[in-house]
Image: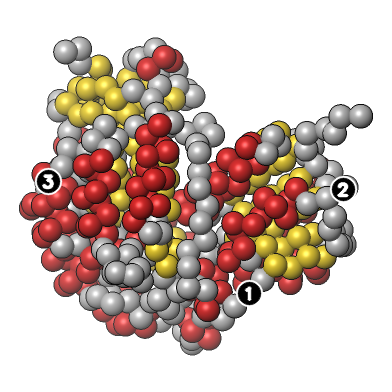
């Protein structure tokens, strides 16, 4: 009798690093002839790549575990990711079926665990993540259903911001060796990806732990020169990691996209100090203004954490005023979420949930204005757009410009994964940007 191909469902919560790692699981499963099915379907094996960055993400991770067993009570269920790392034992309190918990240091063995013939009711593959010195190597062949590929070049964080659980879940900063990063980019090139997003937990620390030490600029120079037909986009960088050399490289390199994301978190110095952030308001202001002067078309994004302990009306007002003044293209706004094991969780002056919600709403309204203003600046201009899909209510092609503007434009389905020169024509009342392909 021929053995049936196992059906495997994978779901991913959280950041781009998790998305890269899940793509590696799927690549490896497909190489071993497993059938990949949607998570909503009945499967033999379910893999939950979890997140713990907020209380809501942890709750969603638990919900996905329950959902897997509801889909198939006899399934093999594996939970990995940050929630598994910091709270894996708590899963035993919510389920009574066999489960496999895989810590972040063992993700390169997850597919072996998933496809093993013999397993126990409860399996825990864990270690002290703070002692792990090498990055977990997870090669990826392709990203299912995506025209942009994520390339994880770094993992872990040494900063220990007082609100953040990530160093406890991911360990210390570790980098992918240069040749392996170049090799992975080459794989994506062979698979005809036109854009690669470099990702990491603390991207700006790339290479400092390697022997001999390296830096992000050195890697970037090699990537953009070896793969001139691929657009490269950077993930988040700390304000102090923006150098004149980096801005010169962006200015002088057509395939390095003018898009920089700089976490702010708060626009008040006293709150930044309590957060254990490494910069102050004037430092952030100088960096954003430097980018804006040197590269005026660049999309500059910011993360903002609202309702940190001790954030009174004055501190929130300082944040609102700073964000209003700065030439930012968009904001990612999050309410502070109390995370166990972090210093901020034990701080006094925790902010009331209703107050947090109101402040979040104010900043999200500002985000909408910032996006509209940035989009309007480019109406009438021509930008290069990577066509991604036609799955939208307008039944038009949708893609992103080099400077991260989402644009809808007429193009055939066959144009997916091609780069078009598009004239940006108009912005509707909902801030949707429309354009027209320029034929050369």
Nearer to the camera, 69 or 23: 23
Residues marked 2 and 1 touching at CB (< 8 Å): no
Disc 1: which residue: 127
Q: Where is residue 171 in the image (x, y as percent from the top left)?
A: 50, 73
Regarding mark 1 in the picture, which secondary structure is present there? loop
Q: Position of residue 279 (x, y in %)?
A: 24, 75
> Quick check: can you spot residue 306?
no
Regarding mark 3 in the picture, which secondary structure is present there? helix
Q: Which of marks 2 and 3 is nearer the N terminus?
A: 2
Disc 2 from disc 1: Cα separation: 28 Å
- Classify 10 Å Cα crowding around label 3: few (below 14), some (14-19), many (20 and above): some
Q: Residue 389 carries which label?
A: none
Q: Earlier in the sequence, mark 1 or mark 3?
A: 1
Instruction: Classify the position of the C terminus by image quarter.
Output: top left
Disc 3: which residue: 251
Disc 2: which residue: 73
Disc 1 from disc 3: Cα separation: 43 Å
Please tell me which residue is depicted at 34% across the width and 32% down the height of the picture: 194
Regarding mark 2 in the picture, which secondary structure is present there? loop
- Classify 10 Å Cα crowding around label 2: few (below 14), some (14-19), many (20 and above): some
Please tell me which residue is depicted at 35% across the width and 68% down the height of the picture: 210
Q: In this view, does 330 lie to the left or right of 412?
A: left
């Amino acid at each position: 009798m021929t053995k049936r191909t196992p059906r495997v469902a994978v779901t991913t919560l959280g950041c781009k690093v998790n998305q890269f790692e899940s793509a590696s699981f799927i690549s490896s499963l497909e190489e071993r002839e497993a059938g990949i099915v949607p998570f909503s379907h009945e499967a033999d094996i379910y893999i939950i790549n979890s997140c713990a960055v907020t209380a809501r993400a942890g709750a969603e991770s638990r919900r996905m575990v329950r959902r897997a067993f509801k889909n198939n009570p006899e399934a093999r269920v594996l939970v990995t990711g940050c929630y598994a790392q910091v709270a894996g034992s708590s899963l035993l309190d919510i389920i009574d079926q066999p489960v496999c918990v895989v810590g972040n240091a063992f993700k390169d063995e997850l597919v072996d665990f998933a496809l093993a013939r013999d397993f126990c009711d409860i399996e825990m593959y864990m270690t002290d993540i703070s002692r792990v010195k090498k990055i977990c190597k997870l090669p990826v062949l392709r990203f299912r259903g995506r025209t942009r590929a994520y390339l994880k070049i770094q993992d872990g964080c040494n900063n220990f911001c007082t609100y953040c659980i990530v160093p406890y879940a991911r360990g210390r900063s570790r980098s992918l060796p240069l040749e392996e990063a170049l090799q992975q980019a080459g794989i994506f090139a062979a698979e005809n990806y036109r854009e690669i997003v470099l990702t990491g937990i603390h991207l700006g620390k790339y290479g400092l732990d390697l022997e001999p030490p390296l830096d992000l600029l050195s890697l970037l120079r090699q990537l953009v020169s070896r793969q001139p037909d691929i657009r490269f986009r950077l993930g988040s960088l700390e304000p102090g990691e923006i150098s004149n050399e980096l801005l010169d490289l962006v200015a002088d390199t057509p395939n390095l996209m003018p898009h920089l994301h700089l976490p702010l978190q708060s626009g008040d110095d006293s709150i930044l100090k309590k957060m254990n952030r490494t910069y102050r308001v004037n430092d952030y202001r100088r960096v954003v203004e430097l980018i804006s002067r040197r590269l005026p078309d660049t999309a500059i994004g910011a993360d903002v954490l609202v309702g940190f302990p001790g954030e009174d009306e004055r501190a929130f007002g300082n944040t609102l005023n700073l964000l209003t003044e700065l030439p930012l293209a968009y904001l990612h706004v999050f309410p502070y979420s109390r995370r166990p094991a972090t210093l901020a969780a034990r701080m006094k002056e925790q902010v009331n949930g209703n107050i947090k919600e109101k402040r979040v709403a104010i900043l999200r309204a500002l985000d909408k204005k910032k996006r509209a203003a940035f989009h309007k600046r480019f109406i009438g201009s021509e930008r290069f757009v990577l066509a991604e899909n036609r799955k939208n209510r307008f039944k038009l092609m949708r893609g992103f410009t080099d400077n991260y503007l989402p644009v809808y434009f007429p193009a055939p389905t066959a144009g997916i994964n091609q780069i078009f020169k598009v004239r940006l024509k108009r912005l509707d009342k909902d801030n949707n940007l429309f354009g027209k392909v320029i034929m050369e």
